[in-house]
Image (cartoon, rainbow, N blue to C red):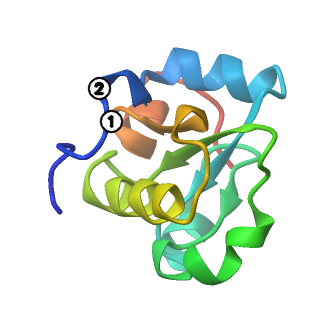
Amino acid sequence: MDSDSNINPDKIIDTNTASKIHSNDEGIIIDVRSTNEYTHRHIKNAISIPVDEIRSRITELPSDKKIIFVCNSGNKTCTKAYQIVSDTGFDSNKLYKIDGGTNRWIQDGYPVE
């Protein structure tokens, strides 16, 4: 599962769209990278849930908001998280991932901590 073949292209959003959803409180950003990567630098106000912990922490995800996954580049780690959450019964219409991940977010000048 190292491609985006399981994710509808409409569910891959750009940094501008992700920023708007997040700042308008319509959704949350879940950083699925390791704790060390998150600690080093992460999207401002993103929540750290490493991909290997997603299944055990599924109750922390809101069912009433959009969930935006982010990793370093927006590829396989995000795809894995998306698939796990989708497979547990979350509405896939509320699941997204950021094209280009944290790297693109930083490159595009959005806030990090």
Front residue of 55 and 21: 55
Q: Quadrant of residue 108?
A: top left
Q: Position of residue 26 (x, y in %)?
A: 78, 27
Residue 44 falls left or right of residue 24: left
Q: Position of residue 71 (x, y in %)?
A: 42, 54
Q: Amino acid at mark 2?
A: Pro
**Disc sitting over residue 100 in the figure:** 1
Crowd around label 2: few <14 · some 14–19 · many ≥20 (10 Å): few
Q: Closer to the observer: label 1 or label 2?
A: 2
Q: Position of residue 90 (x, y in %)?
A: 61, 52
> Could you tell me which residue is drawn at 33 percent across and 54 percent down?
79
Residue 4 falls left or right of residue 19: left
Residue 108 falls left or right of residue 90: left
**Disc sitting over residue 17 in the figure:** none
**Regarding mark 2 in the picture, which secondary structure is present there?**
helix
> Could you tell me which residue is drawn at 52 percent across and 41 percent down?
92
Q: Position of residue 38 (x, y in %)?
A: 57, 65
> Could you tell me which residue is drawn at 49 percent across and 69 percent down?
37
Residue that extends furthest to the front in the rendered view of this protein: 89
**Which image quarter is the N terminus in?**
bottom left
Q: Quadrant of residue 104?
A: top left
Tell me which label, 1 or 2, sits earlier in the chain: 2
**Regarding mark 1 in the picture, which secondary structure is present there?**
loop
> Does 33 appear above or below 68?
below
Residue beneath disc 2 = 9
Front residue of 19 and 83: 83
> Could you tell me which residue is drawn at 46 percent across and 62 percent down?
87
Front residue of 82 and 13: 82
